[in-house]
Amino acid sequence: MTLPTDLDCQTCGACCAYSSDWPRFSTEPDADLDLLPPQFVAPDRSGMRCEGNRCSALSGTIGKAASCLVYGLRPDVCRTCMPGDPECLTARAAFGLG
């Protein structure tokens, strides 16, 4: 599969606000999870804390300017979402970003 190369995550952020099920911890060792600031971790430690569907570590405005406040520590599920992959395009479509 060839992914679009013109999608810029820092002007999008849709994947971080599409579903509270996406920022889940799956393969991270406990030592990595302990590095995350507690205010961004769900009370049950299953994943990132969300406000509705939006990850609490997402800063900015969807479709304009977005960044992750814990980018270097983000969960594996966030690292595997690539610009233009099916998950990206699903999230973008939900926000009308085509």
Image (spheres, rainbow, N blue to C red):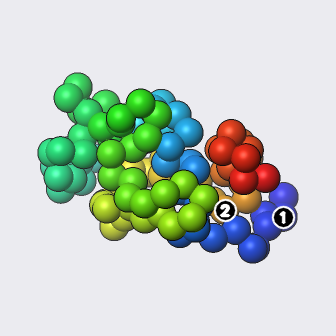
Q: CA distance from mark 2 to mark 1?
A: 11 Å
Q: Residue furthest top?
A: 44
Vertical placement of 49 versus 61: above or below? above
Side (left or right) of 33 relative to 16: left
For marks 2 and 1 on the same chain, the one whose residue lies earlier in the sequence: 1
Residue type of the residue flagged with mark 2: Pro
Residue 65 coordinates in the image, percent (x, y): 51, 67
- Residue sitting at x 56%, y 48%: 15
Residue 62 coordinates in the image, percent (x, y): 54, 54
- Residue sitting at x 41%, y 37%: 24
Residue 43 coordinates in the image, percent (x, y): 20, 29
> To which quarter of the image does residue 26 belong?
top left
**Residue 33 in sight from this viewpoint:** yes
Q: Residue beneath label 1, please?
A: 2
SS category of the residue bearing label 1: loop
Residue 84 coordinates in the image, percent (x, y): 73, 59
Mark 2, residues whose alpha carbon is within 10 Å: few (<14), some, or many (≥20)?
Answer: some
Side (left or right) of 74 relative to 29: right
SS category of the residue bearing label 2: loop
Q: Residue beneath label 2, please?
A: 83
Q: Nearer the viewer, residue 14 or 81?
A: 14
Give yes or no for contact between labels 2 and 1 (Cβ–Cβ under 8 Å): no
Vertical placement of 64 versus 25: above or below? below
- Residue sitting at x 49%, y 57%: 61
Side (left or right) of 32 relative to 71: left
Residue type of the residue flagged with mark 1: Thr
Which dot, 2 or 1, sits closer to the camera?
2
> To which quarter of the image does residue 1 belong?
bottom right
